Image: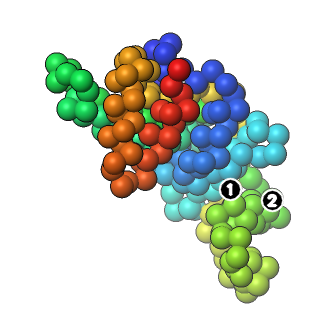
Amino acid sequence: MYIPAAFKIKDLSEMIEVIQDSSFATLFSTHEGMPYATHLPVLLNDAKDCLIGHFAKGNPQWKDIENQKVLAIFHGPHCYISPSWYETNQAVPTWNYVAVHVYGEIELIEHDDELIKSFNNMIQKYEHHNSTYSLTQVDEQLVSNLNKGVQGFRMKILSMEGKKKLSQNHSNERQQLVIQKLEEIDHTNEQQIARLMKQNIK
């Protein structure tokens, strides 16, 4: 990923936070000699050195992915930045965003109990804390059929890089103008970018 120095995320914990907050990833590999990508949720393990997820069995990507060097991309908030928000219109539009790239190697999960554990971890993360849903209440045959329909994997993390493009290459005054305009837009991405810009501004 092209990362100018001003936009580089240097703190590992900040990259991990992006992964945990935006855990619906795009996983790229090579399949039959061509680039191939799947959009899927993944979770970091407790040691923060591995991503865990699963493919639909019908997805051919898993069949030749083991031991490949692969790339998982995590997209944080992003939004359009208009030059009309600046103190002068002698500028061009841009896009502010946060992204983390994780590079690693895939190992397929072969044991049902490990796959069930990964399902439970994902349910625990995404179900509302007041939810009454539990995989333990699901019919055993249904869970068994689910196991047959997916292929679990672990992605050993080899390296990661992060980028937060938040108008750092502009003056503080211009950044404040952008924040003000973003806060007036009632959309989640714009609100999140405004909050991150506030945290990042010097």
Kind of residue at badge 2:
Glu
Instruction: Compute the Cα span from label 2 to label 1.
Output: 9 Å
Total marks shown come to 2
**Mark 1 — residue?**
152
At a point 76% along the width and 84% down the height, the residue shown is 137
Q: Is residue 135 left or right of residue 100?
A: right
Image point 68% across, 77% down: which residue? 131
Residue 159 location (% of width, % of height)? 66, 26
| Residue 196 sits above or below residue 89 on the image | below
| Residue at 49%, 16% in the rendered image | 6
Specify which label sits upstream in the sequence, 2 or 1: 2
- Residue 191 appearing in the image: yes
Q: Is residue 75 visible?
A: no
- Above or below, 16 relative to 118: above
- The residue sitting at 52% across, 62% down in the picture is 58
Residue 69 drawn at (x, y percent) = 60, 30
**Lateral position of residue 112 relative to residue 39, left or right:** right
**Secondary structure category for the residue under label 1:** strand
Q: Position of residue 107 (x, y in %)?
A: 71, 43
For the residues labelled 2 and 1, say whether their Cβ atoms are less than 8 Å apart. yes
Q: Amino acid at mark 1?
A: Gly
